[in-house]
Image (spheres, rainbow, N blue to C red):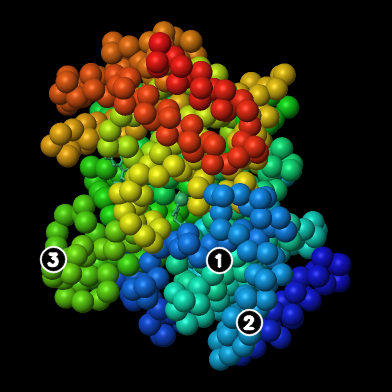
Amino acid sequence: MSSSLAALNDWVADVARLTQPESIHWCDGSDEEYQALVRRMLDNGDLIELNQETHPGCYLHRSDPGDVARVEHLTFVCTPERDDAGPNNHWMAPADAHAKMDELFEGCMRGRTMYVIPYCMGPIDSPISRCGVEISDSPYVAANMRIMTRMGKPAQARIEREGRFVKGLHSVGELDPKRRFIMHFPEELTIKSFGSGYGGNALLGKKCHALRIASHQARSEGWLAEHMLIVGIENPAGETHYVAAAFPSACGKTNLAMLIPPEGYRRDGWKVWTVGDDISWMTPGEDGRLWAINPEAGYFGVAPGTSESTNPNALKMLNRDAIFTNVGVTADNQPWWEGLPGQPAKDWQGRDYDPANGPAAHPNSRFTVSAKQCPSYSDKAEAAQGVPISAIVFGGRRASLVPLVSEARDWTHGVLMGAAMGSETTAAATGAVGVLRRDSMAMKPFCGYNFADYFSHWLDFDRPGAKLPRIYKVNWFRKGDDGKFLWPGFGDNLRVLEWMLKRVTGQVDARETPVGNLPRAEDLNTADLEIDPAALDALLSVDEAGWRSELSSIGEYLEDFGPRMPGKLREEQRRIADALKA
Ligand code: GTP
Ligand code: SPV
Ligand code: MN
């Protein structure tokens, strides 16, 4: 037996001693195993069969009504020093956190099956990929991990070869929010999660490993683990540029990653290829460019709003072999959510639909589906070295002020753009919705270390020989006085991406402003676009008075991190503030 296999066996034995499961199942990742998990959940009520004629292989999971989203207030980064976790994280001393969690885990799997789930984040043969093992007492977690990661025997073989893997321990516990914690021990490559079955809290390969633990590793190893989609844009000449974009949770990554070009663009031969919709690991290549892989193998996407007019690619991949969580159902048992045609018969809690109870689908209801089912799935998504990134985009939900698109003057300005990102909160996390907060690089809930050190790490990529992507900031969510979105969004977002790529390839000038370079109106392709000229004007203008107060708010935000905040970012903020005063 290899020493790494022995280490894995020892850990599994330790966990079994602590949690006392009735049986242990080592996941092999086979189809038969997935089918058996589904049958087991159909028997115990974790899954409900959907209409198999219209949706073969599709099932519905209704979660506990108090367990429907990530819980940021119960999520901790447990570094030995509090300052290393930073003001952006909740912190607990590692020894205290282990003691607390071990008490919760004690005997928690009695009468249950313990699943040992080896997984690989990233293509199984990629040097950039990293492995982990999640131990969970939830068959729903095992089935979802099969869809979301390369799970099973090949991952276990890689772990036995490499030795190093992230240890994730998870139990649904009693689903009691008072006994719910998501703890990260980055130095120990360890995660302990108790009391929730919800995606981001329970599918530990995703946010816990591929973002919180990975971002911590990436800092010391010279790469980036980001909350970014990766999309390939193919122009009529057949050239494909890859764009990575960070938008906060439920702010449009899945939609942009699967975009269908407007009709005129399609006619001209534009195509869009999906590499990833949520997470990007980016490494500098020998050529100086940043190369990105999507560590995931599936999508855990927001259901509401997904429709034939917004995201037809997603709809096409959802008519077979998908797990739906907390959506409604129609009278003939098809999955239903707000945005779809037809009528719901039952809501997400299984009650007869009554608008007085709120939406039929929970606003954070989700689908889990294999990435390969996406019609626009890129053949480069499996490439071991990843894809080269031409542009990085930061975006958020900002009803006012922030223009449709602006370009950073240089890398430092771009890092400030990302650091300063503000966005209105969404249903992806428990708590108030629609409240403006800073969500730097869309990583506020996911950066496994101090944001000040994270910004320094970003700045460090600007070094001799680097051929860095240009950085952009976008806002699809500007609203008019009537409360309606000014920009049509979705497929039409390609118009904005086209402008960025024209900038990257030196085909157009831009209008220089203190907050960045904006498109000249004539350079944004508006052919066949239905938009009021006054709206377009508002989207492409800079409200200097509004920006002066935004810059002072950004300045205060940077100050909150104290002396660890890189001086370069504060200087950049001051430069822009001064330019706005001039
Ligand atoms: P996570 O999976 O939570 O990280 O979210 P995500 O960033 O992938 O969000 P997603 O693409 O699922 O979008 C969430 C919501 O934003 C949905 O309700 C969409 O309909 C809406 N949305 C996405 N793109 C646009 C857009 O261009 N304009 C407008 N107005 N809404 C959009
Ligand atoms: C997010 O909240 O950003 C998600 C969903 O992508 S979860 O995996 O639950 O975090
Ligand atoms: Mn996300």
- Residue at 40% from the left image edge and 39% from the top image edge: 422
Give the label, 3 or 1, closer to the camera: 1
Please report contact status of discs 3 and 1: CB closer than 8 Å, yes or no.
no
Tell whether circle 1 marks a residue whose Cβ is less than 8 angstroms from ligand 2: no
C-alpha span from label 1 to label 2: 14 Å
Q: Which residue is mark 3?
A: 355
Q: Nearer the viewer, residue 412 or 465?
A: 412
Give the label, 3 or 2, closer to the camera: 2
- Is disc 2 placed on a helix, strand or loop? helix
Mark 1 or 2, nearer chain start = 2
Is the N terminus in the top left, top right, bottom left or bottom right quadrant? bottom right
Mark 3 or 1, nearer chain start = 1
Amino acid under disc 3: Pro
Amino acid under disc 1: Ile
Disc sitting over residue 103 in the figure: 2
C-alpha span from label 3 to label 1: 34 Å
Q: Which residue is mark 1?
A: 182
